[in-house]
Image (cartoon, rainbow, N blue to C red):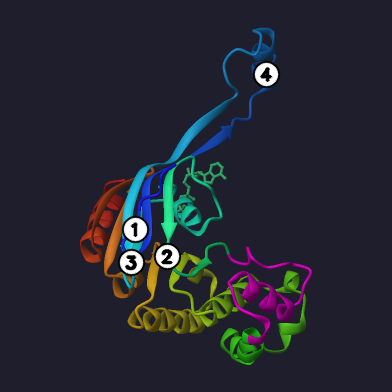
Amino acid sequence: MSVETVPDNIAITCRKLRKVFVLRNTRSMKESIVWLVKGRKGDLSKRFDALQDVSLDVAQGETVALLGLNGSGKSTLLKLISGVLQPDGGTVQTRGRVAGLIEVGAGFHHDLSGRDNVYLNGAILGMTEKQIDTMFDSIVEFSEIGEFIDTEVKFYSSGMYLKLAFSIAVHTDPEIFLIDEILAVGDEPFQRKCIKKIKELAAAGKTLFVVSHDLDLVSTVCERGVLLEHGKVIMDAEVHDVVRELRKRSEAA
Ligand SMILES: Nc1ncnc2c1ncn2[C@@H]1O[C@H](COP(=O)(O)OP(=O)(O)OP(=O)(O)O)[C@@H](O)[C@H]1O
């Protein structure tokens, strides 16, 4: 597969991205027997295009909101960009270090303490042990985890997971932040703190790609909006215009 040369100022490039999921339908005993008797003709599973021909460029320092109704493919696109999922067609390229806050606690090892997970996650995000040593206290302070830092993370609440994951990610100083709806699980004061931090990251020229159903929030944080519907990009414009269009479609739905 040929990989095109991407200009220096482009942080994320998606070309004709496609993701297919196989849906294995639950069948009744009778249906399964008929299927067997007929010589296993036909398929018990269905293929489903979660993303179709998605192409977009995100420039360095751009703040982009990925919007759409439930099931439109937002999380799938973020997972393809972060490398958590592989595409079934097309290409995706990123320039610079990527921090993905996609599934709360996804990068955590449940039987390890918060402290050990800070080192594990920091290393995954490209930090050396020395760098993590230097930042450790600041990571714990921002996360508000306090003495629970030495507790196994399987005993953390989802909000605690989020706080620690967010704190580690912002301390690793990545160029690109992928954020999926995770702010929803934090309490109000922490949400405010996260939003303040996200705005600081945007002001510092970081590239942000944010999935959220909180349209007021994304309107204040992001400049550009990309609207997905049934796995396709149907609008890519100034965020306020895209939010207006999504609200119109939501009312009609
Ligand atoms: N692992 C999977 N296997 C099968 N289908 C999947 C899988 N992951 C996602 N899907 C399907 O792909 C479609 C897109 O899902 P995705 O999570 O990307 O949507 P979304 O826009 O993020 O939705 P939401 O707003 O509800 O979070 C959905 O129909 C979903 O059921």
Q: Residue at x 35, y 55 (%)?
A: 5
Residue type at tag 2: Arg
Q: Is residue 205 above or below residue 10?
A: below
Frontmost of labels 3 and 4 is: 3
The disc at residue 131 is: none
Comes first in the chain, label 4 or label 2: 4
Q: Which residues are magenta?
A: 104-130
Mark 2, secondary structure of its residue:
loop
Frontmost of labels 4 and 2 is: 2
**Position in image of residue 64 (x %, y %):** 33, 65
Taking the magenta stretch, the answer to whether it contains residue 126 is: yes
The disc at residue 8 is: 3
The disc at residue 6 is: 1
Comes first in the chain, label 1 or label 4: 1
Q: Is the residue marked by circle 1 packed among few (<14), some (14-19), or many (20+) residues within 10 Å?
A: some
Q: Marks 2/3: CA distance?
A: 8 Å
Q: Marks 3/1: CA distance?
A: 6 Å
The disc at residue 32 is: 4
